[in-house]
């Protein structure tokens, strides 16, 4: 996995910033250090964004920095065995936490790869399918969907589902109809009627995977039979 110069600069700058923050605390409070807690917290934040190789590099750098910070406390002495044992336990704990952060990053990357593979498979299904995320951004559009919607895939990808179908019309009109679809308490699979500009009215079956910010909505056009006065969507234009 390659990184742009901007991404590489970001991780180096953030790591340096965390180390400077800890160093400033150590200057003010010479008998204590927040290095283990702050560095481990930062490491898990890195694990949520970067792959295991980057997390491992940051872990090694911070591990050496934590060891230096702990050994720099004035009350610490290499001549006292209890201080050495305390240092070893803290470094071991930080090492275990770092290993867990690396595993977290690896698990996240595998989930992302699985999701990308699933979306790639959906794009090849011979049905008019459109997949959008919790914000409404269109992630996948099948070839048959581009024909039905009379739009190019480049025009649809990364645009927003709300802009494509406009406002929500139901028994209770709400401007936040998409948020209702994403986080509502209705069934995971439901039918709607869509009225799209330049296309006309078409039934659709919406399948929701997950909920809230992790939700994906899979819309299959031309399927499903919405009950009367259930839900409809009208174009804004």
Image: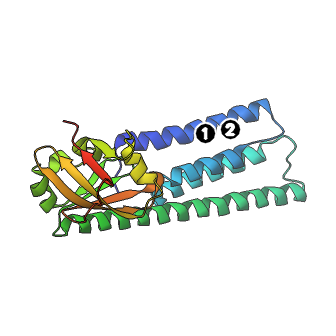
**Label 1 environment density (alpha carbons within 10 Å; few <14, some 14–19, many ≥20):** some
Secondary structure under tag 1 reads helix
Residue 19 location, x and y as percent? 62, 39
Q: Which residue is mark 2?
A: 22
Q: Position of residue 230 (x, y in %)?
A: 33, 55
Q: CA distance from mark 1 to mark 2?
A: 6 Å
Q: Nearer the viewer, residue 207 or 117?
A: 207
Question: For the point 40% across and 63% down, which residue is it?
Answer: 209
Q: Residue at x 85, y 47 (%)?
A: 76
Q: Looking at the rendered structure, which numbered label has been put on residue 18?
A: 1
Give the left or right position of residue 184, taking residue 2 as reference: right
Q: Nearer the viewer, residue 46 or 77?
A: 46
Is disc 2 placed on a helix, strand or loop? helix
Marks 1,2: beta carbons within 8 A: yes
Res 63 visible: yes
Q: Nearer the viewer, residue 79 or 156?
A: 156
Extreme residue in the front direction: 228
Q: Position of residue 180 (x, y in %)?
A: 42, 49
Q: Name which quarter of the figure residue 155 lies in.
A: top left
Label 2, residues with CA under 10 Å away: few <14, some 14-19, many ≥20: many
In the picture provided, is 25 more to the left or to the right than 215? right
Q: Report whether 194 appears left or right of 17.
A: left
- Quick check: 146 above or below 125? above
Look at the image and tell me in which quarter the N terminus lies.
Answer: bottom left
Residue 103 horizontal/vertical position (percent):
54, 65
Q: Is residue 158 visible?
A: no
């Amino acid at each position: 996995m390659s990184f742009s110069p901007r991404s590489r600069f970001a991780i180096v700058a953030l790591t340096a910033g965390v180390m400077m923050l800890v160093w400033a605390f150590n200057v003010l409070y010479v008998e204590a250090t927040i290095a283990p807690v702050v560095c481990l917290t930062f490491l898990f934040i890195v694990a949520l964004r970067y792959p295991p190789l980057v997390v491992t590099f940051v872990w090694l750098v911070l591990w050496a920095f934590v060891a230096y910070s702990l050994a720099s406390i004035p009350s610490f002495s290499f001549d006292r065995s209890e201080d050495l044992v305390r240092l070893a336990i803290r470094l071991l704990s930080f090492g275990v936490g770092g290993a867990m952060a690396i595993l977290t990053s690896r698990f996240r990357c595998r989930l992302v790869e699985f999701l990308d593979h699933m979306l790639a498979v959906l794009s090849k299904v011979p049905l008019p399918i459109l997949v959008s995320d919790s914000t409404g951004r269109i992630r996948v559009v099948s070839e048959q969907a581009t024909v039905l919607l009379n739009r190019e895939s480049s025009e649809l990808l990364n645009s927003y589902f709300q802009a494509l179908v406009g406002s929500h019309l139901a028994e209770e009109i709400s401007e936040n109809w998409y948020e209702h679809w994403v986080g509502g308490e209705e069934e995971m699979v439901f039918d709607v009627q869509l009225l799209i500009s330049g296309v006309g009215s078409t039934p659709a079956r919406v399948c929701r995977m997950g909920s809230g910010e992790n939700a994906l909505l899979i819309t299959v056009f031309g399927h499903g039979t919405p009950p009367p006065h259930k839900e409809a969507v009208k174009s804004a234009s």
